[in-house]
Image: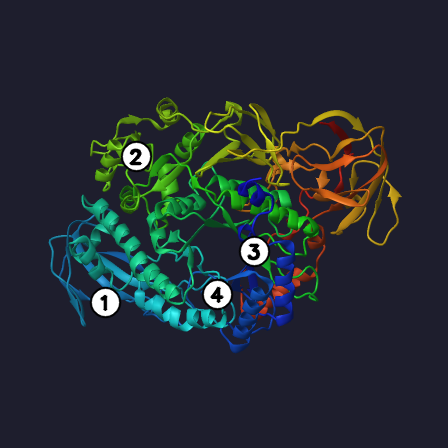
Amino acid sequence: MTELSEKFRTPPREAAPMMRWWWFGPAQTPERIRRELTAMRDAGLRGAEVSYVYPMAEEGDLFLSEPFLQNLRHAGEVADELGLRLDITLGSGWSYGGAHIGPGHAARTLHWERFEIAPGAQRIPIPAAWPGDELVGAYLGDGSIQEAPDDVRPLAWDADGIRIPAGAGPRVVLFAISRLTGQNVKRAARGIEGPVLDHYSEAAIRHHIDVVAEPLVNAVARIGSVFCDSLEVYHGDWTPLFPQEFEARRGYPLLPELWKLDVDDAGSARLRADMGQTRTELYEDRFLMPLQAWARSKGVPLRVQGYGEPPAAVSSYRFVDQIEGEGWGWRDITQTRWASSGARVCGVTVVSSETWTWNHSPSFRATPLDLAGEVHEHILCGINQFFGHGWPSTPADGPGVGNVFYAAAALDDRNAWWPVAPDLWSYIARLSWIMRQGTRIARVGLYVPIRDIDASLEGLDLSRRARTWIGSAIPAAIRDAGHDFDLFDDASTAFLAPDAFDVIVLPRASEVPSAEWIRRARAAGALVIAVDRAPGDAIADLTVPEADLRAALQRRLASDHPLVVPERHRAAVGVTHRRSDDNDIFFVANTAATPAVIAFAPTGAHENWALADPRTGDIRALAAGEIELAPYQAIVIVGGVEGDRRVYKADREVRAERWSVAFPGEVQEPISFPHRWEDSRTGYSGSASYRAAFTLDRAGDVALDLGGVEALPSELADRGIRGPSFRAKIVYPVGVAAEVFVDGRRAGSAWSAPFRVELGALAAGDHEIEVVVHNTTANRLAVDEHLPAVAEAAERAHGRRFRIQDLDLALEGVESGLLQEPRLRVHTR
């Protein structure tokens, strides 16, 4: 048995998911800390990232108070004792900021005002409509409000106001004003309420480090990483030193040209692109670099979700120690793809994602299959470490169901399906571990034309604007051609070898500052394809319409994986490839609610090929032929590993007799199928034991099949789903997970398709089967009268800091119980 086989069967704990651990208030106790960390350890999780958010109770400790810091210190000590990793967020809510941030350190925006004035000379006061307003520039142009002004020139001002000379006709005066955005920290804990800080100001982040980050880090002896959540500094496009920084970086003064942002001119596109580049550089130089340097001085890695506002680029991840993304969608430009591409640029093997945000909302509707299905999407985007979103800390003796976070699945031991959680986390750990081996193969480089984007599209978030610019058809064409891709931008080329990609795709790019690197890439053998239009640098080998990109790729770049996906399944079956010295590893996932069949045609690269099952850890020899994939099923195909060569063939079916059920504290009662709990047990979340007997006339290997799945009708698939929520859109045969026992021995669990459990080799004679079914806690949530009252009380005490999820949808589409009659299938070797 190879090391790869051994560690796939029993993956190291380092590969298990982490959980974002929400401390509400932050009201916390040492007893609850120990109880919840112990539950994480016992379930097989890697650890927790502490996140301090809005109150869910009328009372609690203040953020950064001594009782709060003592609890944080205790969490670090307990995590150490239990062998868990503990990460901490360097602030409450998001983005960084709080009560310590005054006007000099707060986020700012460039605000424009335009007025039409008469021809006569006049002096007008300096505009200051809002506290903190600072006049940046004043400009005068001939024309009116209805017409774009021309002959625009700067105006001078002093303490007495702005002097406007006489003119021959109507004019327009433009004011550029530096204004506080007014944005406060979202979802803040008690005692930290206040403005979001200026992410272009080194003084601002250093002040935040001194006041907030230092006490947090000093409270915990051993920290896995310090964390910066997604950048959501809305409209934060200015900083007081922007004009000086701009001139130093771009080589020309900004203020004489600034009016071109508000009045379209021949130089406006260039100015917008230069402004965007300067913002990205300031975010890197004045926020990320000081933060990373401070974290390293503490001996702690910095983990950042590097996308959003301010405009973080793919290449900005080079100032981050641990790279993180979020969002699912393997055929599109997602923030997970942004992060995994940054990892490629930086040469980083492990890249994480915030996972399960809004999963099958509202809280407690998420099933193990919902969670696994979303993980598959993230892996197809290049992710191999998962931070679950998340674990709401809640009092053990609190009223009702307890605390939930407004935007996430509640993934803790209150879930009725928690008895199968160790199997789920082991499944994810197997995939995380094996997808860290070797190097991810992405043969296509997809260029992000940042200057074109900044010149043409409004907004700050580069990842979103890149998605808009590139669209969904281009990445889908690359995947349909049998390839994976990484994004790269101009700054990335300083860190990528010219032979990094076999094909480079330029999506509607006109200005390409990295044209010289692309020429070197062509000289190294890369094919350069321009989509829809060619840039003026004569760097493209061919130009194709977007609709012809897939065909061009298929003609010029053969797929390197041994899988043939039929056309009807191309949008459903995703493949990602990693290569090590000894192995080729292919992760294959059916991301649809219907079955798929693919063909395996092994190449001569390896003598042995194997199919690794992440549900069980089993590795079996794989020969050429068809592979059936159930809805949302994932497998791993490994070249260079010898698997179990025993062949199993189903030769007969045995029917179990006398099915009965017992709920906790009750006696067994006969049932018929389907057996649906909601028909008689409103609000019940928990378990029930189903039992039956069967007889084998001769020995054999037996599997229990709990039934088939079918796709939800389209009119039901998204009912009750909110935002970018993932769910497995199937009708389950069991609601929602089952543990299977034969003759008192646990054989395994079933929570994903195919809903089948191998019982092992059984002797001839009589046997007893037990199926313990666990549903979701959504049933209990639906009848909980306490949670809305708790949220209302918290809002009365602390203001509206969140909105509770749509609790009226808690039971939408929920079915619990044993919904099909199980079948026993006997195999011979």
Q: Mark 2 points at which residue?
A: 508
Q: Name the residue under label 4.
A: 92
Residue count near mark 2 (Cα–Cα under 10 Å), binned few <14, some 14–19, many ≥20:
many
| Image quarter (top left, top right, bottom left or bottom right) of the C terminus | top right
Question: Which residue: 16% across, 54% down?
Answer: 251
Please, which residue is most extreme toward the front here?
A: 1
Q: Mark 3 points at which residue?
A: 46
Which of disc 3 and disc 2 is earlier in sequence?
3
Residue 329 visible = no
Question: Which residue: 69% across, 62% down?
Answer: 786
**In the shown orientation, is residue 489 left or right of residue 735?**
left
Distance from the alpha carbon under mark 4 to that under mark 1: 37 Å
Which of disc 1 and disc 3 is earlier in sequence?
3
Helix, strand, or loop for circle 2?
Answer: loop
Distance from the alpha carbon under mark 3 to that under mark 4: 23 Å
Image coords of residue 245 (percent x, y): 22, 60
Q: Nearer the viewer, residue 779 or 698?
A: 698
Residue type marked 4: Ser
